[in-house]
Image: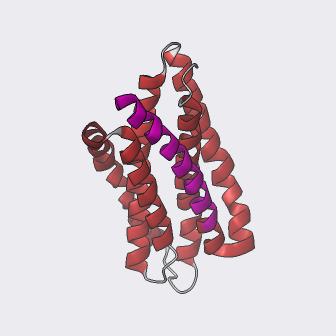
Amino acid sequence: MQHRGLPFLFLICFVLMGGFVTLYNYVGYRLLGAPFRLNQTEIGAIFTVYLTGVVASPWSGKMADAFGRGRVLIANLLLMMLGIALTLSFSLPVIIAGIACLTFGFFAGHSIASGWVGRLAAQAKGQVAALYLLAYYIGSSLIGSYGGHFWTAFGWPGVAGLIGALLLVGLAGAAYLNRRERAAVA
């Protein structure tokens, strides 16, 4: 692992997956309670926005080719931040739009980050890919479960705050990678 950008990609995948899993782990609790009082079937139907990943991944590759990986990664982290902000609404359609934005941003961002790992790894590509996946699943398990403490203590605003803070960390990492990418092209 020789390239300086790789740890930032590992951090970004930790943040992406941690925020994504945390949203899906806890937003259902919000929608079960007042004022929404949705049932499990209705909440499950909302989660069909997960299918945006089918569009997000190939789209992000095309956008990265056109505008650069760093810019597209930043845009998708910002889209995720918009999504989590929208989930703070008390309007169900706005919350659903927020879930869709975060989901699309996650799949597009993960597509960019995972592809970038392969490009930056000069040697031991298999080991570098394994480290990426390790960070991905650690983000899922640690942050995905730790979000429950925020739910218990602060309700949905606490969970949204945790995800927003994670995304800010990811945004800082993506900004660093974007600067390095642009400097390499110049």
Asked whether 8 falls inside the magenta stretch, the response is no
Depth check: 128 or 145 in front? 128
Picture coordinates of residue 143, whole percent (x, y): 65, 51
Quadrant including the C terminus = top left
- Picture coordinates of residue 45 (x, y %)? 39, 66
Relative to 43, does residue 117 appear above or below in the rendering?
above
Give residue 151's position: percent from left, percent from top. 68, 68
* Residue at x 27% of width, y 36% of height: 65
Quadrant for the N terminus in the image = top right
Indicate whether 119 appears above or below 14. above
Q: How many marks?
A: 0
User: In the displayed image of the protein, which residue is found farthest to the front?
Assistant: 186
The answer to whether 127 appears left or right of 67 in the picture is right
Q: Which residues are magenta?
A: 161-186
Quadrant of res 109? top left
Is 69 in front, or is 105? 69
Q: Residue at x 52, y 54 (%)?
A: 20
Residue 163 colored magenta? yes
Q: Main secondary structure of the magenta part?
A: helix
Relative image position of residue 5 (x, y in whole percent): 53, 31
Snapshot quadrant of residue 28: bottom right
Task: Please say which color scheme the image uses.
Answer: secondary structure
Give the answer, above or below, for where 42 lies relative to 61.
below
Taking the image as shown, residue 42 lies to the left or right of residue 16, namely: left
Q: Residue furthest bottom?
A: 35
For the question of whether residue 44 can be seen, the reply is no
- The residue depicted at 49 percent of the width and 46 percent of the height is 175
In the orientation shown, which residue stands out farthest toward the top? 123
Q: Is residue 12 visible?
A: yes
